[in-house]
Amino acid sequence: MESFLIKGGVPLHGEVQISGSKNAALPIMAATLLTDEPCVIRGIPDLSDTRFMAEILKSLGAEVKFQNGTLTVRAKKIRGYADYELVRKMRGSICIAGPLLARLNKTRISLPGGCVIGARPINLHLKGFESLGAKIKIEGGYVEASAKKLSGSTMFLGGRAGSTVLGTANVMMAATLADGVTVIESAACEPEIVDLANFLIEMGANMSGAGSPTITISGVKKLHGAEHEVIPDRIEAATFAIAAAATNGEIEIKNCRADHLRAVLDKLIDAGVSIQPRNGNLTVRRGKNLKAVDVTTLPYSGFPTDVQAQMTALLALAPGISIVTERIFESRFMHVSELARLGADIEIEGPSAIVKGGRPLSGAPVMASDLRASAALVIAGLAAKGATQVNRIYHLDRGYEKMDLKLRKLGARIQRIEEK
Ligand code: EPZ
């Protein structure tokens, strides 16, 4: 297994180019199953998750070509079955269910199971499919959904933590080919949902309201092929902004949509970070000194849960007490015990992490546990004095394209090594 070996204490300087959004790319890749015509998607980040999704599309019978960030898919003849071996490796693959149900009126998919950050149920996805007239059967770890013909309906998709991103994506995609009108109340408002809606509209879908809590879809007979460029990855942009602040550097973030990051930029400014938007890029540097702030994760446009771990790492450096509250997932503090190995003073109290910040961090070997926790450990290692080895960085490779290369270009001393 591979690790990152980081020699910390170097302020980051220079420019970083943000890749396309993983969380926009995955549902858009699944949406290509909705038509038998060719689709071309550009700006797809080269990650293990996107390569895996391309494998899944191939396993379903689609012709797939994926190179230099451009994916060409033609789902001429496809089957509706995805087995456990495929789905268990990436929870996000559940978003093929909606397109398969819409295209074939039947699909059988392994239940995705949970992951380290939470149980990851799909009850809201299934509620949406049932509301469209599908029969749902769960047995042997598989979910089977079938319908003579999907028919539009009005549904409420809010759950234990508010809206569901992939649940909204799945139901939106299924509704594009249903008879009649579907109204999704308490829909997710994330920019990735808007990007998916834009692609579906380019395919000939008839919908409005994406980005708001109410999305209305009028089913059409057929969708045609389309071309699309994926939006920039707002979580990657936030991760690099936080790394610049943590190392007391100054970087320019290129290909970044500041309007997708309002909550993060607002919180960073409160924490003493200077952010200058300049013709589509962001210049980020630490101001005089970091300040303790409180953060609560919420559905969009609130502070994103996918930036919580990275922000916690930054606040470990900010003198004072910061309270970080995780409202989306039930156990997304796996990074805290590893940050403690670098000297961070953080206590977990229920859904909150109480961060007593300001002590300098010192390098140590740490273990990555999930995608964003790994990013937090890299950030802390970049800020810590001495050497930090972040092990099991396959977690990181799922969601960050060439992170070590991008960081080295910013002056970081980071090497990818074989874990001894
Ligand atoms: C998407 O996951 C993202 N993944 C996650 O990013 C992100 O953290 C999450 O949205 C929240 O923003 C992709 O887009 C591929 P949810 P998703 O359904 O859609 C509960 C990353 O690091 N819920 O919005 O699976 C659920 O338990 C990843 O890039 C139900 O109760 O998340 C959670 O508490 C991690 N029932 C909350 O809703 C359901 O049927 C939000 O989950 C579905 C979800």
Image (cartoon, grey):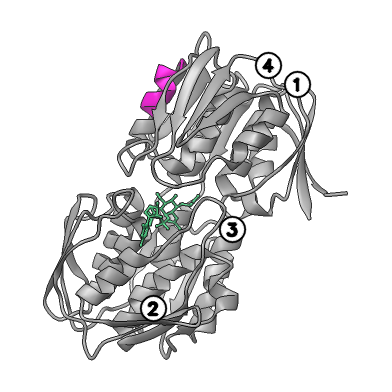
- Disc sitting over residue 335 in the figure: none
Kindly report the distance in space between the C-alpha atoms of the residues bearing marks 3 and 2. 20 Å
Determine the CA span between mark 4 and mark 3: 33 Å
Name the outermost residue toward the front: 350
Q: Are marks 4 and 1 in contact (CB under 8 Å)?
A: yes
Residue identifier under label 4: 360
Looking at the rendered image, the disc whose residue lies closer to the viewer, 4 or 1, is 4
Question: Closer to the camera, 195 or 1?
Answer: 1
Mark sitting earlier along the chain (3/1): 3
Task: Residue at 34%, 66% (x, y): give it.
Answer: 123
Residue 396 in the image: state x and y as whole percent: 63, 49
Q: Is residue 267 magenta?
A: yes
Q: Nearer the viewer, residue 327 or 306?
A: 327
Badge 2: how crowded within 10 Å, few (<14), some, or many (20+)? many
Image coords of residue 210 (percent x, y): 22, 55
| Residue at (34% x, 74% y) in the render | 98
Type of the residue with mark 2: Leu
For label 4, the SS is loop
Q: Earlier in the sequence, mark 3 or mark 2?
A: 2
Q: Nearer the viewer, mark 1 or mark 2?
A: 1
SS for callout 2 = helix
Q: Could you tell me the amino acid type at mark 4?
A: Pro
Q: Nearer the viewer, mark 4 or mark 3?
A: 4
- Magenta-drawn segment: 265-272
| Residue bearing the label numbered 1 | 385
Single out the residue that lies furthest toward the left: 180
Locate residue 42, reporting x and y percent: 45, 61
Which label belongs to residue 47?
3
Secondary element type, mark 3: loop
